[in-house]
Amino acid sequence: MQYKADSPEEYINQLPEERQAPIKKLREIIKKNLPKGFEETISYGMIGYVVPHSIYPDGYHCTPELPLPFMNIASQKNFIAVYSSSVYATTELNDWFVNQYPKHCKRKLDMGKSCIRFKYIDDIPYDLIGELASKMTVEEWIAIYEKNIKK
């Protein structure tokens, strides 16, 4: 679902009550683990973690006025989602996440290219998401992004 918000706090306050605590917890674990340089913002109607224009002035190639996206969290209609560009862009990180997931959750992984979906709030592997957030620096993300965009 799209929420109209100007800040992460405003986004969270619009969520159904049962979704607020898990989104707050995801937000805190990501912020705690994200390498220096990424910035929290509202991006694509979700809470986003981006490479700011002050570090990467080119922005996102599709929409250069937007900063380069890295990770997002959102409350969708039927699930909570974590969107991770690094899982989509690197086979190694994707394989790592897919292999680690069963160690943290009893239900089957529900994942698209960059979207990790949690239909059940008690299935959210907060520590694993925190570890995922920590696995790539801003510099590494920019290098991977530029390599993939120039293909």
Image (cartoon, rainbow, N blue to C red):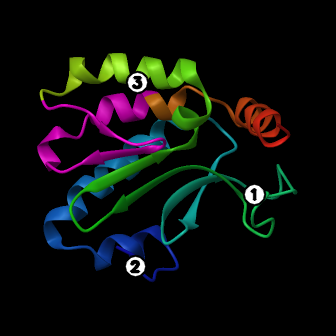
Which callout, 2 or 3, points at the residue further toward the start of the chain?
2
Going from N to C along the chain, the mark reached first, 1 or 2, is 2
For mark 2, what is the residue?
3
Q: Which residue is mark 3?
A: 97
The amino acid type of the residue labelled 2 equals Tyr
Identify the residue at the far bottom of this view. 4
How crowded pointer 1 is (Cα within 10 Å; few <14, some 14-19, many 20+) is rated as some
Q: Residue at x 37, y 61 (%)?
A: 74
Residue 125 on the magenta segment:
yes
Q: Please give the name of the residue rendered at 55% of the width and 25% of the height, measured from the top-left corner.
A: 135
Quick one: label 1 or label 3, which is nearer the N terminus?
Answer: 1
Give, as a three-letter code, the residue at label 3: Phe
Q: Which residues are magenta?
A: 107-131
Indicate the quadrant containing the N terminus: top left, top right, bottom left or bottom right: bottom left
- The numbered dot on residue 113 is none
The amino acid sitting under disc 1 is Tyr
- For the point 75% across and 62% down, which residue is it? 62
- Give the residue drawn at x 55%, y 36%: 88
Can you say whether 143 is above or below 24 in the image? above
Separation (CA) of disc 2 from disc 3? 28 Å
Residue 134 is one of the magenta-drawn residues: no
Circle 3 residues within 10 Å: few <14, some 14–19, many ≥20 = some
Tell me if label 1 and label 2 are in contact, CB under 8 Å: no
Is residue 4 shown above or below 44? below
- Real-space Cα distance between discs 1 and 2? 22 Å
Locate residue 91 relative to residue 132 in the image: left or right: right
Secondary structure, mark 2, is: loop
Query: Mark 1 highlights which residue?
Result: 60
